[in-house]
């Protein structure tokens, strides 16, 4: 019963978006730096927002707050709008749905806990992470544990616990990062292909293929931190995830690159002999 | 802090780094940067350490900075090349980083990486 209702709702909503379709052609016709792009892009994102909300709703009830899911789904939607090429013969919805779903799935994968962490600690971690994001917006810089403690009205020791609980993410993230390239998502025509900024680096020949293999978001975050020298808080704001999430992604990506470079070294010296 | 020069001990060093930076009330960016830098410095040295040797780590806590020094014994002078990506990572994450090696005898070197992480200046 419920299934049928969802389907008819979807059918209904795809008509709802008909008036937006020509906007993609308009957007494609404008130059990359045309100031009118921004307005059209906003209209598209706003217009398709019900789609993101709908997908977020389907993932509700798994322990992630609804607002977070909608935020993640919206990031997926923005990516879809930015990357969709109307001349490729597919319609936007069939492109956007897997992109947005992929983003939400990735969120679950990135934020799954490696070991059994007591509920109290998970909640503490989430509230510390949330407070950190809000304070960063207010202060325009990263907050300190003391500031987070006074913002939440809890002790500094509790903040420490909440921050450290985030480390329980690490172990699983490392395993999962092996061979995750977006589960067949249409991320191929990645934007900013050459923005890693590693050209000046001596071992860039070994590094380049490793960086190219990274999921697009990880590659982008690495470039923002180590080439554009943005702080984690600035990156978090730009990418639309928490600073702690940026921290985890950087940590696992650096580990992955180190491992890859080391393997490259070993192969090279084996070839020398 | 002296541990076996083995990658399995890295989480311990990282946890200590995070703990020290939190208690010094560094901001959350600096706490994570220090953790990542410790990870980078230790793993780059551990991979060149003589099997069964020691990883020596020292944290020196000042009023406005934390200095971290890591030392391993290696068969070669494996001071990191300053034009590698790993070095770029270290210089981005920290405020001042140096690396040097002491020759112990014909076959052994002590290789060190030392960096300083300053408490970010906060405009209140």
Image: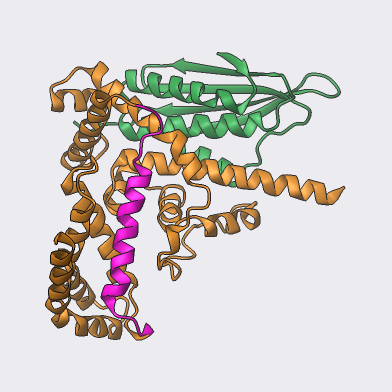
Q: Residue at x 17, y 59 (%)?
A: A53
Name the foreground residue: A165 vs B13: A165
Name the foreground residue: A150 vs A210: A210
Chain letter, orange in picture: A
Q: Position of residue A66 (x, y in %)?
A: 17, 47
Q: Position of residue A177 (x, y in %)?
A: 48, 46
B30 sits to left or right of A130: right
Q: Position of residue A241 (x, y in %)?
A: 29, 47
The secondary structure making up most of the magenta span is: helix
- Above or below B22: residue A101: below
On the question of residue A47 being in view, the answer is: no
Residue furthest to the front in view is A1
Name the foreground residue: A11 vs B64: A11
Question: Is A170 part of what is drawn in magenta?
Answer: no
Q: Residue at x 35, y 85 (%)?
A: A89
Residue A248, picture quadrant:
top left
Question: For chain B, what colour was chosen?
Answer: green
On the question of residue A42 being in view, the answer is: yes
Quarter of the image that includes the N terminus of chain B:
top right
- Above or below A183: residue A45: below
Q: Residue at x 27, y 29 (%)?
A: A122
Question: Is A90 part of what is drawn in magenta?
Answer: yes
- Above or below B75: residue A103: below
Quarter of the image that includes the C terminus of chain B:
top left
Residue B34, picture quadrant:
top left
Q: Which residues are magenta?
A: A88-116
A212 sits to left or right of A41: right
- Above or below A63: residue A46: below
A99 sits to left or right of B115: left
Q: Position of residue A1 (x, y in %)?
A: 14, 62
């Amino acid at each position: 019963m419920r299934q049928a209702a969802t389907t008819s709702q979807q059918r209904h909503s795809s008509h709802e978006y008909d008036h937006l379709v020509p906007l993609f052609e308009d957007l494609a016709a404008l130059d990359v730096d045309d100031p009118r792009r921004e307005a059209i892009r906003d209209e598209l994102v706003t217009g398709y927002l019900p789609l993101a909300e709908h997908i977020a709703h389907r993932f509700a009830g798994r322990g992630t707050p609804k607002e977070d899911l909608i935020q993640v789904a919206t990031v997926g939607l923005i990516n879809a709008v930015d990357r969709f090429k109307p001349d490729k013969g597919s319609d936007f919805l069939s492109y956007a749905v897997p992109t947005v779903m992929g983003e939400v799935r990735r969120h679950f994968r990135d934020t799954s806990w490696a070991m059994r962490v007591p509920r109290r600690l998970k909640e503490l971690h989430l509230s510390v992470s949330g407070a950190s994001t809000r304070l960063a917006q207010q202060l325009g810089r990263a907050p300190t544990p003391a500031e987070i403690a006074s913002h939440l009205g809890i002790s500094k020791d509790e903040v420490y616990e909440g921050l450290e609980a985030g480390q329980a993410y690490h172990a699983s993230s490392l395993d999962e990062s092996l061979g995750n390239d977006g589960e067949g998502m249409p991320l191929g025509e990645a934007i900013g292909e050459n923005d890693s900024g590693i050209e000046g680096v001596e071992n860039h020949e070994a590094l380049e293929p490793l960086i190219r293999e990274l999921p697009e978001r990880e590659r982008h975050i690495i470039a923002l931190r180590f080439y554009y020298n943005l702080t984690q808080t600035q990156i978090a704001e730009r990418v639309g995830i928490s600073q702690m999430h940026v921290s985890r992604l950087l940590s696992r990506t650096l580990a992955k690159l180190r491992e890859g470079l080391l393997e490259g070294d070993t192969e090279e010296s084996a070839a020398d002999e | 802090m002296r541990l076996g020069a083995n990658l399995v001990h890295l989480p311990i060093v990282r946890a200590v780094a995070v703990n020290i930076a939190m208690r010094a009330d560094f901001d959350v960016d600096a706490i994570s940067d220090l953790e990542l830098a410790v990870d980078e410095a230790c793993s780059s040295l551990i991979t060149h350490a003589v099997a069964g040797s020691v990883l020596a780590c020292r944290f020196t806590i000042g009023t406005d900075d934390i200095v971290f020094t890591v030392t391993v014994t290696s068969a070669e002078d494996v001071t990191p090349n300053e034009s590698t990506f790993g070095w770029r990572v270290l210089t981005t994450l920290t405020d001042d980083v140096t690396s040097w090696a002491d020759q112990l005898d014909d076959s052994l070197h002590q290789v060190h990486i030392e960096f300083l992480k300053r408490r970010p200046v906060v405009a209140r």
